[in-house]
Image (cartoon, rainbow, N blue to C red):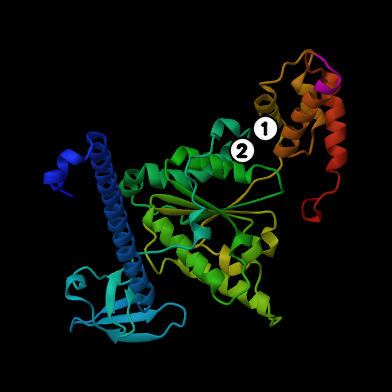
Amino acid sequence: MDETIFNNPDEDNISKPRIQELNEQVQDLRMKVEVLNREVSRLEKDNAQLKKENNQLKRPPLFVAAVVDILESGEVYLRQQGNNQEYITHSLEALQGQLRPGMKVAVNNALSIVKIIGNTFDTRVRVMELEESPNVSFKNVGGLKEEIEEVREAVEYPLTKPEVFERIGVEPPKGILLYGPPGTGKTLIAKAVANQANATFIRMSGSELVHKFIGEGAQLVRDLFTLARERSPAIVFIDEIDSIGSMRTQDGTSGSAEVQRTLMQLLAEMDGFDNRGNVRIMAATNRVDMLDPALLRPGRFDRILEVSLPDESARLEILKIHSSKLNMKNVDLLDLVKLTENTTGAEIQAICREAGMIAVRKDLNYVTMKNFEDAVLKVRKKNKTEDIMYI
C-alpha cells in the first residue's frame, strides 16, 4: 500500500499520531504477506515432493534376474531369481557394453533390463565377515607347533608368499580340516591365522547354513563364496562343519534332504567349478567320524589335521601363557603340568582363571599353589563327563 494515499486535502484534519498508527499497520500487513508467501512456497515444494513419491509408489515394481549369457545378437539370456524361469530379452543401449555373465539386473514388466544391480548378498552372510582382525596371534597358542606350521603352509603362505609356490611349481592345498576333542585350540588357530594373514576373514558356524526352506541353505553357501571371491584374498572358516557335512542317509525326511542339498552346494563350491582365486578354506569339527567321505577326499580338504590333547611340554607353554598376568607366589608350574595330565588347553585356561578367582574370594594378595590345586579339582570335577569318541 502506497503511503501517498494519505496526502489529500483532508490531511490537515488527520492527526499525525493517527497517520503513524496507520503506517505501522501497513508494515505489519506487509510482513504477514511475506510470511504467508514463504509458507505457500514451502507447501508447494512439499506438494511436489509428495506427488513425486506418489508416482514412484504407483510405478510397477522391478524384478531381479541373473545374467546367464550374452548372445551374439546382443540379446541377453536371463534367469529370474526365485522361480528360476529363464528367458531371452533386450537391455537399454546404455547398458549393453556393461553386462557380464553372473551379474544381477533389474527387469521391468516387459522383462527388459533397465538397471544393473551387481552382486547382492544375504545379510546373514555379510555379518560373517570380520571387520577387524582377531586380537589373537600364534604367541597365544601354546604347543601345537607342528599343527600351526601345517596350517600356515596351507592357508597363510599361499596368500602372503604366492611367489614361492610359483617358483617351485607346486599348487598349495585347497583346504584344511582341523579335528580333535573340544577345547584343544582349533578355533584359536583359525583366529591366529586371520590375524597373521592380513586377509578378509569370513567365519561361520555350520549350523548357520541349516535352514527350513528348500534352497535357502544352498543360496547362503553361494553368497558366502561369492563374497569371499569379491573380498579376496580371503579365508573362509567353517566351524562345526559336521552340522551340514555329516554322512548322507536315505531317511527321506525333508529336513535331512535340505541339509544334503546344502552339503552338495558346498562340495560344488570346493570343487572349484568357479575359480576361487585367492580364497582359502578352513574347517573344524569334533566329530570327524560323522563327516561324509565326499567331503574328506583329496581335492576338497587336502590336509586333515588332528589337534590332539597337549603333551607335557605343550601344557607347560599353555600354563605360562595363561598365568603370565597372575601375581603368583611359590607356584611350581612343573608340578602343575603333572596335575593337569589329559586336560585340554581350554581347561588349563579355566584352571588359571579359577585359581585367580579363589585368591580373590579369599582376599589374598597373590595366587598360591594351593589355589591352583583347588582350581584343578574344581575344573576337573566340572568337566568329568568325557566324549566317548575320545576316551
Residue 314 is marked as: 1
Question: How far is the residue under mark 1 from the one under mark 2?
Answer: 7 Å
Task: Indicate whether 22 appears above or below 175.
Answer: above
Vertical relation: 338 (above or below) 115: above
Would you say residue 340 is visible in this rendering? yes
* Picture quadrant where residue 257 is located: bottom right
Contact (Cβ within 8 Å) of mark 1 with mark 2: yes
Q: Which residues lie in the magenta part? A: 360-364
Q: Does the magenta stretch include residue 99?
A: no
Left or right of 389, for residue 196:
left
Disc 2 residue type (three-letter)? Leu
Main secondary structure type of the part rendered in magenta: loop
In which image quadrant can residue 10 be found?
top left
Q: Position of residue 343 (x, y in %)?
A: 77, 38
Residue under numbered circle 2? 144
- Whichever of labels 1 and 2 marks the residue nearer the N terminus, that label is 2
182 relative to 110 in the view: left or right = right
Q: Can residue 103 be seen in this view?
A: no
Residue at image x 37%, y 85%? 86
Residue at (52% x, 44% y) in the render: 150
Q: The residue under label 1 is which amino acid type?
A: Ala
